[in-house]
Amino acid sequence: MFTKLATVVVAAVAMMAGLFVTQAAASGGIAMGGGSGIILAGRATCTLTTIGHDRSGSLVGITAGHCGNPGASVVAERFRGAGVIGRMVAKNSALDYAVIEFDPGRVVPVRHVGGTTITGIGSPVSFPALICKEGRTTGHTCGWAYGDVFASNQTWGQVCVREGDSGGPVTVGTTLVGMINAYLSQACVGPSVGTNMNAVLADLRARGGAGAGYRPI
């Protein structure tokens, strides 16, 4: 059984907002990159896959599609008191990815978050490649890739993921190859499943609009 990985944030966020304003947020430059925690529409907690620019020059990011719907507000989990820094502008439910447009005046895109650095996007990998993921819930974890088991634009792997890791970047070295979308059966035991980034980029090109021509910073 596939288990989607978005989580729900309790209403107490509003009461605690002031505790999360840091110097970075106060200065107007919130660092965001692949692996950063995000809150969509004030309730779903997920992970940013990657951040960069599309062919129009807009500052955009990618996350799992089941985290929200177009129009949903986006808040940086670590800087909740800073308020809305972007909005979801497009999604593809079949591939389970979404595009976020960030406010370039408030967000500083970064390549390094936690144990993950992203310098480019590559093709899917197969067994026995070692893959790693960065999630807002379980952090940096690594394991074997099983590959695109059913030729479905998804890579299965043995990396620990839990609710909230949705959208987490899957990397080989510093190359982004996929995202986290679900796990099977049991968190951190059953295989992880995620959409291949080459499928996401191809779909963005075909659709046009927000995210088309995406390139990471």
Image (tube, grey):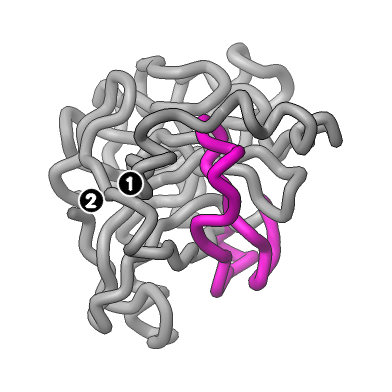
Q: Position of residue 68 (x, y in %)?
A: 69, 57
Q: Is residue 165 above or below residue 188?
A: below
Residue 67 vs 182, above or below: the answer is below
Cα distance in 3D space between marks 1 and 2: 32 Å
Q: Amino acid at mark 2?
A: Ser
Residue 167 image offset from top left, x and y in percent: 51, 43
Q: Along the polypeptide, which appears first: circle 1 or circle 2?
A: 1
| Residue 41 is inside the magenta segment | no
The circle drawn on residue 123 is 2
Residue bounds of the magenta highlight: 67-96
Query: Looking at this view, is 154 or 176 the one in front?
Result: 176
Q: Secondary structure at mark 1?
A: loop
Total numbered circles: 2
Looking at the rendering, in which quadrant would you find the C terminus?
Answer: bottom left
Seen from this angle, which residue lies furthest right? 11
Q: Residue at x 59, y 38 (%)?
A: 80
**CA neighbours of label 2 inside 10 A, class few (<14), some (14 to 19), many (20+):** few
**Residue, x 35% and y 43% (percent of image)?**
27
Position of residue 165 measured from the top left corner of the image (x, y, whole percent): 56, 31
Q: Circle 1: is it few (<14), some (14-19), or many (20+) Cα within 10 Å?
A: some
Which labelled disc corresponds to residue 77?
Answer: none
Q: Quadrant of residue 200?
A: bottom left
**Residue on which the image places disc 1:** 29
- Residue 149 can be seen in this image: no
Three-letter amino acid code of the residue under disc 1 = Gly
Q: 13 or 26: nearer the eye?
A: 26
Answer whether residue 86 is magenta in the image.
Answer: yes
